[in-house]
Image (cartoon, helix red, strand yellow):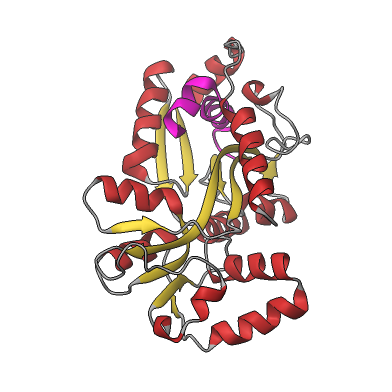
């Protein structure tokens, strides 16, 4: 966002929309029955399996016995490519999918089913597509993160300009995929905030810092920083550093303004083999019960 007040305002609006306590709604019994006849739902996800996917799947299966959740984890770009390849081959495997940019890519090639879950019927357009092509499950904040054993707390760079200090040359890394959680996301943020002329001038200086480009997910980039391969990562999910730090890892995130704030959204795949089970799972993800896992 362009300034810290705008960032806080957006986060407040999104949090209120996603997490507000609403009267519990009853899922249409006909949808539940249809999902049980299908018996399974295949979820292509970018979310971390141990921390969220498995707990959500277990709770969903307990709530709706007879519907088994299978899941495949990849990043947003890999998920989009996989679904497009399945569609070309006439063998769609995905039923429901999520990601920060997956739905946008797949909608352009007519691979997203328009369906809005009852749990999100009253959500504003910012977090639930009025046409029903996607609904937000959570919000991400992307910032630099660092190894607290390699960079002493209090000495980390705190502004974009600080990143240009020669002492950081060759010591920064990012995910190279075309994603908000990669180098392109950082570059987009710079150009949005600084404008094209000033932004390009800044990026020209930043290129001299020899940022290491890795062909792995943002989570894996942070893992390498934690392992001591690199002191600092740009454009990582700030909550990942917190989760790792709670487990004893030397990691922290940098409160560098302005941060990139993006929505994680989920959709039903067009041509899904288990469309009713997909709709039931999507409804669960954005229900109060499902949102409790994201919180």
Query: Residue at (58%, 57%) from the top-left corner?
Result: 259
Determine the image quadrant of residue 157. Answer: bottom left
Residue 38 placement, left or right of 258: left
Q: Which residue is the extreme one toward the bottom? A: 208
* Residue 138 horizontal/vertical position (percent): 54, 39
Would you say residue 288 sits in the magenta stretch? yes
Rendered-image quadrant of the N terminus:
bottom right
Most foreground residue, 130 or 231: 231
* Residue 13 horizontal/vertical position (percent): 66, 34
Any part of residue 270 in sight: no
Query: Residue at (52%, 60%) from the top-left corner?
Result: 256
Tell me if residue 30 comes above or below residue 47 in the rendering.
above
Query: Residue at (72%, 22%) from the top-left corner?
Result: 122
Any part of residue 180 in sight: yes
Tell me if residue 266 comes above or below residue 295 in the rendering.
below
Q: Main secondary structure of the magenta part?
A: helix
Would you say residue 153 sits in the magenta stretch? no
Most foreground residue, 47 or 206: 206
Rendered-image quadrant of the C terminus:
top left
Determine the image quadrant of residue 220. Answer: bottom left
Query: Residue at (42%, 48%) from the top-left corner?
Result: 239
Q: How many marks?
A: 0
* Residue 273 horizontal/vertical position (percent): 55, 37
Most foreground residue, 223 or 11: 11
Q: Which residue is the extreme one toward the left? A: 248
Magenta highlight range: 269-295
* Residue 234 horizontal/vertical position (percent): 47, 67
Determine the image quadrant of residue 155. Answer: bottom left
């Amino acid at each position: 966002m362009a300034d810290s007040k705008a960032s806080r305002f957006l986060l407040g609006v999104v949090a209120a929309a996603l997490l507000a306590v609403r009267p519990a709604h009853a899922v249409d019994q006909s949808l539940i029955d249809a999902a049980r006849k299908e018996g399974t739902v295949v979820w292509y996800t970018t979310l971390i399996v141990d921390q969220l996917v498995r707990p959500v799947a277990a709770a969903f299966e307990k709530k709706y016995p007879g519907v088994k959740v299978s899941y495949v984890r990849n990043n947003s770009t890999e998920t989009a490519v996989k679904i497009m390849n399945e569609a070309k081959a006439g063998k769609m495997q995905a039923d429901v999918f999520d990601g920060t940019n997956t739905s946008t890519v797949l909608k352009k090639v007519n691979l997203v089913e328009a369906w809005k879950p009852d749990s999100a019927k009253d959500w504003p357009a910012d977090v639930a597509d009025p046409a029903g092509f996607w609904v937000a499950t959570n919000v991400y904040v992307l910032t630099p993160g660092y190894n607290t054993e390699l960079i002493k707390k209090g000495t980390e760079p705190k502004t974009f300009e600080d990143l240009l200090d020669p002492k950081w040359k060759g010591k920064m890394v990012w995910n190279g995929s075309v994603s908000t959680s990669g180098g392109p996301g950082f570059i987009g943020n710079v150009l949005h905030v600084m404008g094209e002329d000033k932004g390009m001038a800044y990026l020209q200086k930043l290129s001299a810092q020899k940022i290491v480009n890795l062909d792995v997910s943002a989570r894996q980039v942070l893992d390498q920083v934690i392992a001591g391969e690199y002191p600092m990562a740009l454009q990582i999910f700030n909550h990942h550093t917190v989760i790792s730090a709670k487990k004893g890892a030397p990691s922290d995130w940098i409160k560098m303004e302005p941060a990139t704030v993006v929505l994680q959204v989920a959709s039903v795949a067009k041509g899904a083999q288990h469309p009713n089970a997909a709709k039931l799972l999507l409804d669960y993800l954005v229900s109060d019960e499902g949102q409790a896992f994201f919180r």
